[in-house]
Image (tube, rainbow, N blue to C red):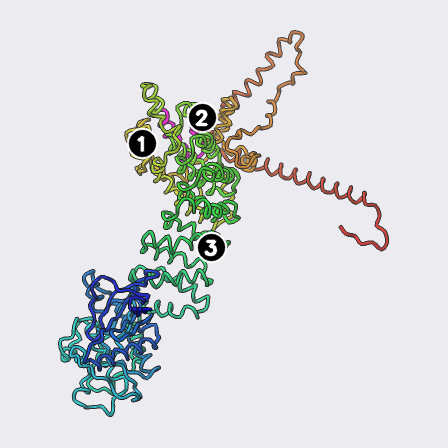
Amino acid sequence: MWFFARDPVRDFPFELSPEPPEGSPPGPWVLHRGRKKATGSPVSIFVYDVKPGAEEQTQVAKAAFKRLKTLRHPNILAYIDGLETDKCLHVVTEAVTPLGVYLKARAEAGGLKELELSWGLHQIVKALSFLVNDCSLIHNNVCMAAVFVDRAGEWKLGGLDYMYSAQGNGGGPPRKGIPELEQYDPPELADGSGRAVREKWSADMWRLGCLIWEVFNGPLPRAAALRNPGKIPKSLVPHYCELVGANPKVRPNPARFLQNCRAPGGFMNNRFVETNLFLEEIQIKEPAEKQKFFQELSKSLDSFPEDFCRHKVLPQLLTAFEFGSAGAVVLTPLFKVGKFLNAEEYQQKIIPVVVKMFSSTDRAMRIRLLQQMEQFIQYLDEPTVNTQIFPHVVHGFLDTNPAIREQTVKSMLLLAPKLNETNLNVELMKHFARLQAKDEQGPIRCNTTVCLGKIGSYLSASTRHRVLTSAFSRATKDPFAPSRVAGVLGFAATHNLYSMNDCAHKILPVLCGLTVDPEKSVRDQAFKAIRSFLSKLESVSEDPTQLAEVEKDVHAASSPGMGGAAASWAGWAVTGVSSLTSKLIRAHPTAALAETNVPQRPAPEGLPAPAPTPVPATPTTSGPWETQEESKDTEEDSSAADRWDDEDWGSLEQEAESVLAQRDDWSTGNQASRAGQASNPGHRSQESDWSSWEAEGSWEQDWQEPSPPAPPPEGTRLASEYNWGGPEPSDKGDPFAALSVHREAGAQSRRDSWGDDNWEGLETESRQAKAELARKKREERRREMEAKRAEKKAAKGPMKLGTRKLD
């Protein structure tokens, strides 16, 4: 039977990279890149080949192998695995790059910042402090060749080949025999002076001074060059001079050197070092300290190195969210660091956390996610959005906090392109209909209309036909002026989605009613919209062959490209209404409610001023609606068909309140009544306007609300009192003459009232009628409750002795 010896190198779970060795430091070891066979994760492999006649060097290499295997410290090169055979030694560590190679590469890319150098030197000094003060070991090889840098930019101390005990155990320092390393030895070792009075750390601190000189000035040519600090920062020079002083007794302990450099104004007293020190101890920090740290971290990330953010800050942020109580404060720095990741890394590290955050019940977390959705929406795929994100987001439509409802509406601008047919055309439209009709906050109703105009192109053809005209018409009856403007601009932004028939029979009648709106900004936008639609109709009338081109998008399944047509309008409106909501809801919640009920007055101080009018432009039938500002007098000089393409959607917040009233007017067929209602869109209370929608979320339901018949004019007789059988006395005249006179007088008074702008009386009457109606309802309800209580009490009869009253 034959037995074959196993090759330990072949069975080793790590393999060397085929790439050539990196710039290996002087010494017995050669540094190779490598990877773990099972996972492919990168590592560094130090290889020493045993050569005949080099027993002393082999013993030094084996001692370094043992030291690295037993020493564990965050600032010392991390040992992973090792292999020792008769022919070679393999030491596997975390993936690192020699400091010399790292500095050269960074110099070609623009150089290292002082922040990075300060933290790197801090780590090396901290490692020396650990060896000298905690382990009583002398490193004996501090130089550029003994320092390595990991992928996060952290400096690690290696090169443990010539380490020895400071207590004298095991003999003196081993002989190096390499001139490149011996040049870093302090002068007292060369001439034997001062050996009796030196401290155990004196030699290593001299070598630290040499390392600092090389970091800032390049390779050290000779020891005499240390007298010239060169490019060493001024804040570090005094402490550097202490290190390279001729008297070894005055060289500071590594711990004291750190303390001196961390003093106010010191080289290591900066935000980057403080951030790193906090991250190293974050597990033992109090929750309040963590909250404050993460809140301030976002401001500093822009000045921090990219590798540090990706490989050190990001894991701590993910850990803080997963296992800590950091909450919403980690979101801002998390998304800021996410910008440094590629698409694959973002999917692996950030998206799982984001999906989990959306299921949180923490309101602060939810609103931060909605506010910053723009930063991660491009990394979310459609199945994730529809199954894991949208079901949680829609709860925001029903939230009692107006700020969350507002942010939820605004987030639909980003989510709509990724929603499926059911979520977009059914579920979302149901919530939008309820918000637009019944939400008590005017800015939120306005935002809903704005968002619908923006996402209209993503809706199916049947949903567009069923929803858009009705929704924008409803918005034009809103008591809140910006909502009326949103309705007008919604028609404009989606102009290519309507047939010519709808433009003539549904849209223009609604817009014409707004020409007598109390708010001038609403009237201005209505006139411009009317001119645009009329121009469109006229062009088709002149050349009927254009009809197919004009209506090409009407029956299209969806036209996402058109979404960019209103980008400037929708983007401005949401931002503007956001600031408006902040003023009306968060700062003055009661004032916001009051203003929504008084549409007849000019826009309050919190609202933006009416937007400037646009520059005239050549009209188009289906081009984008570009925003452009211009002075007010330009509008008056422009022609009827010239001004639609450059529509200033920035006027959204102040121009949206009256078209819905017009749909009532056109359905009544009463011209005089129509003029009166158009001049006073607040003739019906807000409560009655929005509560008439019995089926919640129904866009199709008729928006006309029946009103009680008006009392006959004074002096008019009932039909039963009129003598229908015989002739009337001649002195009485026509019995309907009085009615005719009253009607003409009423129409004349309404025409006159437009010139006077006397809306106060109508508003007062409406308020008084509303208050009286509410008082009667409360009184009636109270009487009903008292009657029910009396009946219930009588039915029970007198109580028996010994029984308990259970009700």
Residue kind at label 3, given as amino acid type: Ala
Q: Earlier in the sequence, mark 2 or mark 3?
A: 3
Establish if 724 lies above or below 153.
above
Q: What kind of element bears circle 1? A: loop
The one of 375 and 471 positioned closer to us in this rendering: 375
Dot 1, crowdedness within 10 Å: few (<14), some or many (≥20)?
A: some
The one of 753 and 14 positioned closer to us in this rendering: 14
Q: Magenta includes 16?
A: no
CA gap, disc 3 and disc 1: 41 Å
What residue would you read off at disc 1? 623
Residue with the most extreme bottom position: 196
The one of 418 and 150 positioned closer to us in this rendering: 150
- Kindly identify the residue that appears in the image at 26 percent across and 76 percent down: 86
What residue would you read off at disc 2? 506
Dot 3, crowdedness within 10 Å: few (<14), some or many (≥20)?
A: few
Q: Is residue 800 left or right of residue 288?
A: right
User: Residue 391 appears at what percent x and percent y?
Assistant: 49, 46
For residue 364, the mark is: 3
Q: What kind of element bears circle 3? A: helix
Residue 709 makes an appearance in the image? yes
User: Residue 227 appears at what percent x and percent y?
Assistant: 16, 79
User: Residue 706 appears at what percent x and percent y?
Assistant: 57, 28
Residue kind at label 1, given as amino acid type: Gly
Residue kind at label 2, given as amino acid type: Lys
CA gap, disc 2 and disc 3: 43 Å
The answer to the question of whether label 2 and label 1 lie on touching residues, with beta carbons closer than 8 A, is no
Residue with the most extreme front position: 1
